[in-house]
Image: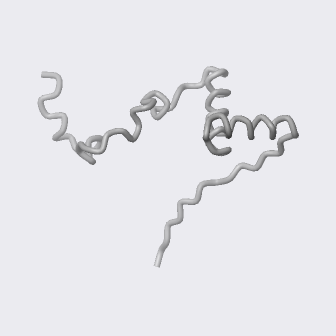
Amino acid sequence: MCYICAVKPYVHARVGKADRALLDALKRATGRTESELVRRGLRLVAKELGGRPSARDLAGPSVGKFTRGPRDLSMNSRHLEGFGE
């Protein structure tokens, strides 16, 4: 038997009292988790440095909004028949 386990890696960071207080305040103010805030912070720093935005960042709030539609849109060429004509 073969099991595939997709465990996300963890990042551990040491923060001082001021940063801990800031993180706690942001959690209360936004309702987001510590992980969400850290991920967003990383993306903001990357953006400051001029990094390219990810496709998910470009899609913005529309991610996960569509419940209907073809599930194989990116893989099945028949969906492109007549496109651009």
Which of the 4 quarters of the picture holds residue 38? top right
Determine the residue positioned at 68% across, 44% down.
34
Query: Looking at the image, which is closer to me, 29 or 44?
Result: 29
Q: Quadrant of the C terminus?
A: top left
Determine the residue positioned at 87% across, 40% down.
16
x, y (%) of residue 74?
Answer: 29, 41
Picture mark count = 0
Residue 14 appears left or right of 85: right
Query: Looking at the image, which is closer to me, 30 or 47?
Result: 30
Query: Looking at the image, which is closer to me, 30 or 78?
Result: 30
**Given the current orientation, which residue lies at the most extreme bottom position?**
1
| Colour convention | one colour
Residue 8 appears left or right of 81: right
Determine the residue positioned at 16% across, 41% down.
78
Determine the residue positioned at 42% across, 30% down.
59
x, y (%) of residue 37?
Answer: 65, 38
x, y (%) of residue 44?
Answer: 64, 27
Residue 52 appears left or right of 70: right
x, y (%) of residue 50?
Answer: 62, 20
**Given the current orientation, which residue lies at the most extreme front position?**
28
Query: Looking at the image, which is closer to me, 3 or 67?
Result: 67
* Above-or-below relation of 36 to 46: below
Residue 16 appears left or right of 68: right
